[in-house]
Image: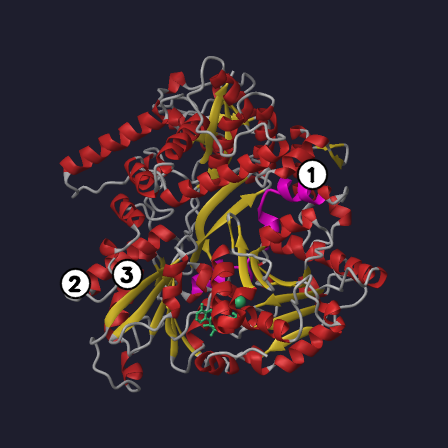
Amino acid sequence: TIQREEDVQTARLALPVVQDEQRIIETIHANTVTILCGSTGSGKTTQVPQMLLENGYGSLIGDSSPAKDLQSRGMIGITQPRRIAATSAAERVAYELGPTYRDRVAHQVRYDTTVSKKTAIKFMTDGVLLREIQMDFSLSKYSCIMIDEAHERSVNTDLLIGLLSRIVPQRAELALEQPEKYCPLKLIIMSATLRVDDFLSNERLFPTVKPPVLEVEGRQYSVTEHFSRKTKRDYVEEMIDKVARGHRKLPPGAMLVFLTGQQEITFVAKKLNERLNRSSSGGFDLSNGTDDYEDGYEKADDRDGFVENEDDDAHDENSGSEADIKVDETFEDEFAVEQLEADHKQPKGALRPHILPLYAALPVAEQQQVFEPPPEGTRMIVLATNVAETSLTIPGIRYVFDCGRSKEKKYDHRSGIQTFEVDWISKASADQRKGRAGRTGPGGHVWRLYSSAVFERYFEEHTVPEILRTPLESVVLQLKAFSIENVAKAFPFATAPEQLQLEKAEALLQNLGAVKGAQMSETGKQILKFPVDPRYGKILVLARNNGLLQHAIALTAGLAVGDLYIPQAQTNEEDDTAAVNTQHQAYGRAQALLSQWDDRSDAVKMLRSVALHAEHYSNGAAEAREFCRNNWLREKSMVEVQQLRKQLHAIARAQSNGALADHPLVPTAPKGKELQRLNQLVAAGFIDSVAIRADLLKSDGVSAGRKPKRAIEVAYRTLKPSISDAGIDRTASPAEREVQRSVFIHPSSVLAKLSPSEMPSYIVYSHLSKAVAATVEGKQKKTRMHPLTPIG
Ligand code: ADP
Ligand code: MG
């Protein structure tokens, strides 16, 4: 058995999962598949792996252990949808296991692993396990697989559960035939909610035996809900105000504030520090923070999703309809101070704020701060994205502030339009957020920055499974690799995507040459070797025969990571004009530098950005950071680009029989025809994403009303039908309908500088997007294309 520190042991014994250890282990022993439901914080992620280890699972392969261990030989693997959860859980479990067993725990996420020969418990992202299944379908290195956070329904989780439903019986057979080599595989599906019907009553997933569902009772104290009377559009300002007042008025207890993204969190942290922390020095102070990167952001003031250059669009007549929703309920939206003060004895206002940000891209050491007790005399205020919804449980939370929104990638497969926008969360998510205030004890409160009417009317019951709102070409190609030819018929999806969605993916794969007939082609196999979207895989495969491999690697790494550029700061009237001018010029210089190789191709601009950054990066992190700051590049994304570049290079090298150098070379300026070929390569990966200038379409009698004055007003039409007629408002004026049918370049494109007459006839674009803020009325904006390169 494992000796744990006393405080660790005490904390464990209080967890519902540990209290139920006997029942859980017996069920897992007796069944190949078990579903375990328990509310957030009940100990699923950190305790079940330890229990399995203590009960003999996870014994090391090659260990000359007694015969009984043969039945449980191999690692205990736990998947997480998020990297932050995989690393944080591994760290926590290592700590709980203490010095003797610490090195049995490891994590593996993209670009980073601590796995060794000693690893018995391995936390990983779901993507890592998917890749492993491609290498070894029987997952022979594992004795147990736990799929965590299954309620989130990420594409990868759904795929894993489908695949594992086939791997488990296969392993049972192998264990019978070759017991000296294989043991049966245990599958444990864990969920923070009881909504597991899609897995449970899905005849295709588990046709013979329905897996047992174990429910662990988490103690959940009741939480008082406060809805806002009105729902404000600018919830960020409102949040700052509410949290600041709450901090002054509320009895001690940690606060958890749900926001939508990193920049928003940084902005709110800064404002709260200014308002609450003026005289004190003990609190969290971003301006002295270790993460310089954040500083660069604040100056730009680009809170996620807010400062879309879209607002530039002077002809967007409908803009500015900032109508707040008014509802007739008269809910108490102030802090119920009298009632709360009855149970608190300390003088109010005495606490200093201890403000901690929490989002996925935060370095692990800083993430861990939320688990540490706050300094004496302070109140912990955690500003988090939805990672704090179910993935991470922060101790001691008594007050939750919920903005009601989250930033989510969405894809409408009918229109082909992708949005990465702030939108309302589901009722189930709102419920999880509220629940964070009821873990520690009674007296929890949640303040919701939306009215109950908006909640009832606009919040979906549950979050839509990701598989229904994402392009599927990557999924389909991966499944074809397992010789699943008819994906729709043969694969046991927990929630099946629409036929049309699968057909579109299939068509694109045909176009890319990755699929021939219904089968994966040789090209498809090569494409799949690269852990990126099949489009990028195609570019890489082509580039190999083209002498442009280094360029293609740098470029596709940039495209795959995406979101590299920080938009130019919006300026306010009261801003210092001289400073604004200086900023403006610096921004212009940066853009000129980055588009130096080709001032019409956004793809080549990206290549140039990655190449320049690579040069500075090789001189050290500080220099690279400086470069990013001077050129409006997101440092963390750029570092990831360099890691991916290295990974792609290593894969290409492995296939080249040593013809390639050890490390990727920094791409040089394309010479002569190279530039053209490079742009053609990009086009080859996006052959289905071409737009033509609308005024070149002869059949089209109607012109889009007034003559465009700026490049971003020039109407284009996509060649493949993307904006379905269904999406067009029949009651709108002809000119308005024309706008709805058209796409326009995104203001961030290098092409935006051109005059309308200079605009190219054809443009290859990476994706379409539409700004749909989480508004109540859902005002329509123009569809924007994100150009890669002009063609023709
Ligand atoms: P679940 O997976 O059911 O949501 P967890 O296993 O993540 O629950 O958490 C169980 C308990 O362990 C919670 O009380 C949580 O606060 C605590 N915990 C989890 N991770 C850490 C950590 N890194 N540091 C301190 N406590 C932690
Ligand atoms: Mg968990």
Residue 726 highlighted magenta (yes or no):
no
- Left or right of 746? Residue 27 is right
Residue 565 x/y as whole percent: 37, 38
Which dot marks residue 110?
Answer: none
Amino acid under disc 3 = Ile
Mark 3–mark 1 Cα distance, whole angstroms, equals 47 Å
Determine the secondary structure under disc 3: helix
Confirm whether residue 731 shows in the render.
no
Assign the N terminus to one quadrant of the image: bottom right
> Mark 1 Cα within 10 Å, few/some/many (few <14, many 20+)?
some
First in residue order: circle 3 vs circle 1: 3
Q: What amino acid is labelled 2 in the image?
A: Arg
Would residue 137 be found to the left or right of residue 441 on screen?
A: right
Between 704 and 477, the one lying in front of the other is 477
Question: Residue 241, position in %: x, y?
Answer: 26, 63
Labels 2, 1: front one? 2
| SS at badge 1 | helix
